[in-house]
Amino acid sequence: TRAVTFYVYRVQSDENWPLTNKNAGNIAGMMWYLHNEVVWHKGGRYGTYFRHPVTRLVKFKVQMRATQPLYDLGMNFGVVNTMDSNRCTGPFHCDNLPAYGGTVGCETWEAGSPNNFPHQQWTGLNRYPGATWYSLPEAGHCPGGVEPTGEGSCIYSYKYMGEITIDQLEGLSSFESFARAGGREYAPKLDNGIHMSFWKGIRDARLCQWRGGQGPRL
């Protein structure tokens, strides 16, 4: 099977964790994640499945090679698996992993696309052009970061490429000072922030595209 190289971003706290058994995305996918699941929380940059507030976007270079059973279906990527608290929680019972190996999953929100799954409830709501999410099961990670072979236990490897803070992204010098002054990143009822306009217009495709261009620029 052919080798594929691409870049992903991961929203993380100040703690360092391996990329295995995690979900990641392209920059548009991670902007959608922040906008839809994180920045609207009043108490800080929290979400459902993590204890510490997120602070940064970390960039990785991923090399992968599909397993032969998956490639025989005409696919390089498998279904996205939801990774919560460092384990696979879906879809269903994660049955695709024993069947095709620890394949990298890929999901978009293009209506009618074969990979518009398993979060298709956001189709039409996610206005970030080209937004893509990935899953990287630990079972497919090549030991020692060697070049992927496409065998079930060596499907992908990754390399750290850099990071930006969410404060940098939003143009803040200190999120804590911003919050103490009554600032809020995004208030859904206003469709805007308070003392901030970076996240204004969650359904505005033009503004979403602009936000998606800010990460690589920094």
Image (cartoon, rainbow, N blue to C red):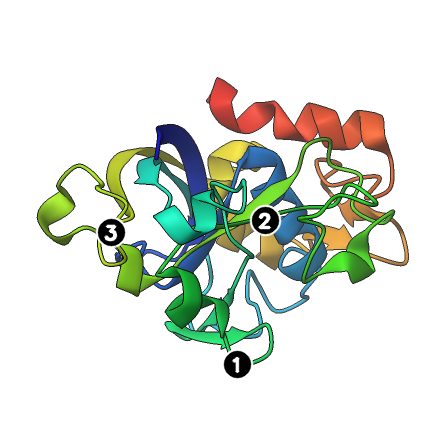
Tell me the kind of residue under disc 1: His
x and y percent of residue 32 in the render?
67, 46
Relative to 130, does residue 11 appear above or below in the rendering? Answer: below
To which residue does mark 2 refer?
178
Viewer-nearest residue: 101 or 144 = 101
Q: Is residue 126 above or below residue 117?
A: above
Residue at 78% x, 46% y: name it.
Answer: 126
Image-based side of 55 in relation to 111, left or right? left
| Mark 2 residue type | Phe
From the viewer's side, name the closer residue of 82 and 96: 96
State left or right for residue 68 relative to residue 130.
left
Q: Residue 24 at x, y = what percent?
A: 47, 49
Which amino acid does the dot numbered 3 rest on? Glu
Q: Is residue 15 visible?
A: no
The quarter of the rendered structure image containing the N terminus is: top left
Indicate the position of residue 15 as horizontal and vertical percent values: 29, 60
C-alpha gap between disc 2 and disc 3: 49 Å
Give the alpha-carbon distance from disc 1 to disc 2, as whole Å.
42 Å
Q: Which residue is mark 3?
A: 151
